[in-house]
Image (tube, coloured by chain):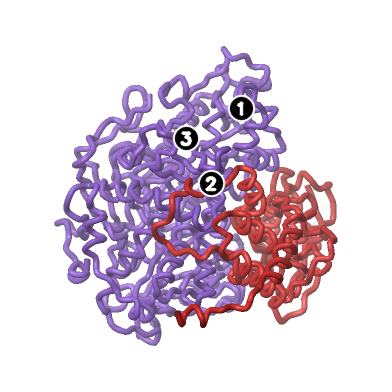
Chain colours: A purple, B red
Amino acid sequence: MSEMNGATSTNGNGLPDARIPDGPLSQKWRTWLDAHHLVGPRNRPGRSVIVVGTGLAGASAAATLAEQGYKVKSFCFQDSPRRAHSIAAQGGINAAKDYANEGDSIQRLFYDTIKGGDFRSREANVWRLAELSANIIDQAVAQGVPFNREYGGSLATRSFGGVLVQRTFYARGQTGQQLLLGAYSALEWQVKAGNVEVFSKHEMLDLVKVDGRARGIIVRDLETGEIERFAADAVILATGGYTNVYYLSTNAMGSNVTATWRAHRRGALFANPCFTQIHPTCIPQSGDYQSKLTLMSESLRNDGRIWVPRKPNEERPPAEIPDAERFYFLEERYPAFGNLAPRDIASRAAKHVCDDGLGVGGTGRGVYLDFREAIAEQGRDAIEGKYGNLFDMYAKITGDDPYETPMMIYPAPHYAMGGLWVDYELQTTIEGLFAIGEANFSDHGANRLGASALMQALADGYFIVPHTVTDYMTVDHGDVSTEDAEFGRVQDEVEERLQALVDVDGTIVPQEFHREMGMVMLDKCGMSRDAEGLKEAIAEIRRIKADFWENVRVDPGIEELNQSLEYANRVSDFLELGELMCFDALRREESCGGHFREEHQTEDGEALRDDEDFASVTAWGWGGEDGEPVPYDEHLEFENVELATRSYK
Amino acid sequence: MRFNLEIWRQFDRESNGHFESFTVDGIDPESSFLEMLDQLNAQLGREKQRMVAFDSDCREGICGTCSLVIDGYPQGPRQVTACQIYMREFTDGATIKVEPYRNSAFPVMRDLITDRSALDRVIQAGGYISTKTGPQPDPNSMPVSPETQKEAFDAAICIGCGACVAACPNGSAMLFTGAKVKHLNLLPQGQPERTTRVIGMVEQMDAEGFGGCTNYGECSRVCPQEISLDVIGMLNREYRKARKDEQPAHRAKMTAQ
């Protein structure tokens, strides 16, 4: 609300108030909407918004703000907004519509998400997400998104990990693609209408603040190399997650942390950076040259059974191993949820059996995902209808036919729950700077449930940020021009940094440093962590960083298309982020969700939370080039759910 | 494995290009084609030579960023995206020719990178359903049979990579445009704009300098999503019908009432 736009109040320890509206949980968003301030239709074309990123969150926000009448500038580093990495999401999107008549409700989606996140997210945010979930499906269908249908023509749903109802809507195994093309088409409609200007192949390299507020960005035109300035009344970052910090991940090659990291260096706090998700069902790594890992949708766990041979170093092909000698480790350990245990739990279980020497495949880091029984029971056609394109993709990559032999899978870094700290209005600790989608930290706590990323990105972009940005823009923050001295100062810093990268004039390409740091991160700040390893990782990353600035190879031209410069610049930011992730993992002396500290586990190896000391969000401030990051805590209040041990047994 | 590469080098839009030869050695057969190019660039970096520019992003065949022509085939010989080609598919010691898409509507930015923004502009001309964000009817109030859904879906899966255009002797974008028209014009939600959509998109296609279809079928032959030539049939039918049905607008009269 506008009175909150002035001096920032804090929760007493330096962190701004999360500005959660009063009143009962189910009424908070309605209350907020009813009270927020509006900009009249005739005044909207005079207000401008910059949206960085054109994935589900960015494209939906840019399109919606433009429909409302604001002038929007949209930026992406890809050559078309349609190529943002949301395109690769496979399995589905959750919504509490209860089409399957199972007694599903907003309350249940809310509770599953809070519990799935291991009680490390805000109640009010998660409730709003669950509340808006149904609208997203309606909106997407109206745009022509071809969700799967039942014979009678109604929408089909299926189950996903961590839940006992079928609330996941899907478009074969290409749900992200179809939802993104829906949002992209809405964006292109607004381009045609003259309300949005899209800048493809433009990468944001810094944020410009004027009088403490976000007023613009510095970007590099990736074709000409020209550094350009853009000003606006508000800036929205929808730049995705940072799991490429692990080098090998399911993210696209270009996915990077630069936009959010540079905003962090300008004063935006970075929350829960150590909360990353390692997805259980990915195609295992096959060699050192490999540049990325491919996800196989979690939906496969609906019908596939996960197992390893009981005997270490088993040499028989899977078909020859009788049932009694197969260890269905998820079904045995978590009988209630079985193969649909949440991602963090399923990943850790796979790691443990491989650590015990039961893993399969060339590297011993793989487990079987077997469709033999599903094909026998339902027929090949039924399985093909549900997962045909996933099976094809697997066959293309590995050369194996999953209809004949079990798939092999292993966990891979996939999603970042952490991100820029935002309040209830999705505003960061910099006024006028908003963060949406995977770029913020808000809704998934310490572990995200399957099919919830698409839901959150679109809830933020279609239904939340257009209203909260409107509220922010009801106050006239004054004109700003790209001629302002601040723009010049920030541009100079950006140019100096690029020049410094070129000036290293080394012989080792950025990819090699990226790979080296990724291995450290995966080993010491991945599926399990301990204090000693984290301290080693910090030292290792500092060494790699120093080496990088001594020996990195970047092609010399800055004012031209230069992919090695783009890559080196992104790696330089990952190196700084990696260190912060280790600090965060070190400070959080508990295990929760995807953050598993070896020192904090139950007798049977499950995560052991410490709600006394860590029922909180850690938001980190930038400590300067040579300083250490500064932590601030936001205590999480649970008024509607009871903090319970998360059991899927 | 060892390969000889003939790669197109071009500094920028205005420059002339030429083929340059390289040799890469010690390539793992399980590495992908793009990972092989990564290794070439690591080698060039060590020698302080300018690296080869090529576009890729998801490297799992869905983003459509890849835009290589490999041994004369857009996206390579196997009807998958370039990122899904593995070196195990080539013979050791082979010479491989790598070029950018060649089409006047897709100018080369550098080396193997082309500008495909013309395809975005075709979408802007009607590849959407004009509906604002806000309250919408419940989807089950407008049933869609699974058969219709499947037909629309088989067109909607286009990844916009432009291989169809690059393969076509006429440089036609009708597979791309037809896929979007089919996707939206089959669905109930797409009906109100059925006519304006197809006319707008076809006119934009012409304005961008794409050619017309003369049934070579090369587009569908290289399409990594295996989109069928049927979409062009539907595009033609929809376009003919739209032109025939075009009525002079009586908007002024409506407003006067």
- Residue lying at the far left of the rendered structure: A12
Q: Is residue A405 above or below residue B31?
A: above
Looking at the rendered structure, the kind of residue marked 1 is Phe
Q: Are marks 1 and 3 in contact (CB under 8 Å)?
A: no
Taking the spot 24% from the left edge, 35% from the top edge, the residue there is A643
Looking at the rendered structure, the kind of residue marked 3 is Ser
Q: Nearer the viewer, mark 3 or mark 2?
A: 2
Disc 1 chain ID:
A
- Quadrant location of the N terminus of chain A? bottom left
Q: Is residue A101 above or below residue A236?
A: above
Looking at the rendered structure, the kind of residue marked 2 is Pro
Disc 2 chain ID:
B
Is the residue at mark 1 from the same chain as the one at mark 3? yes
Q: Earlier in the sequence, mark 1 or mark 3?
A: 3
Q: Nearer the viewer, mark 1 or mark 2?
A: 2
Q: Nearer the viewer, mark 1 or mark 3?
A: 3
Secondary structure, mark 1, is loop
Assess disc 1: are there few (<14), some (14-19) or many (≥20) residues with their C-alpha within 10 Å of its C-alpha.
Answer: many
Is the residue at mark 1 from the same chain as the one at mark 2? no
Q: How many angstroms separate mark 3 from mark 2 (CA)?
A: 22 Å
Is the residue at mark 3 from the same chain as the one at mark 2? no
Secondary structure, mark 2, is loop
Assess disc 3: are there few (<14), some (14-19) or many (≥20) residues with their C-alpha within 10 Å of its C-alpha.
Answer: many
- Residue lying at the far front of the rendered structure: B257
Residue of label 3: A159
Residue of label 2: B143
Q: Which of the pair B152/A129 is nearer the observer?
A: B152
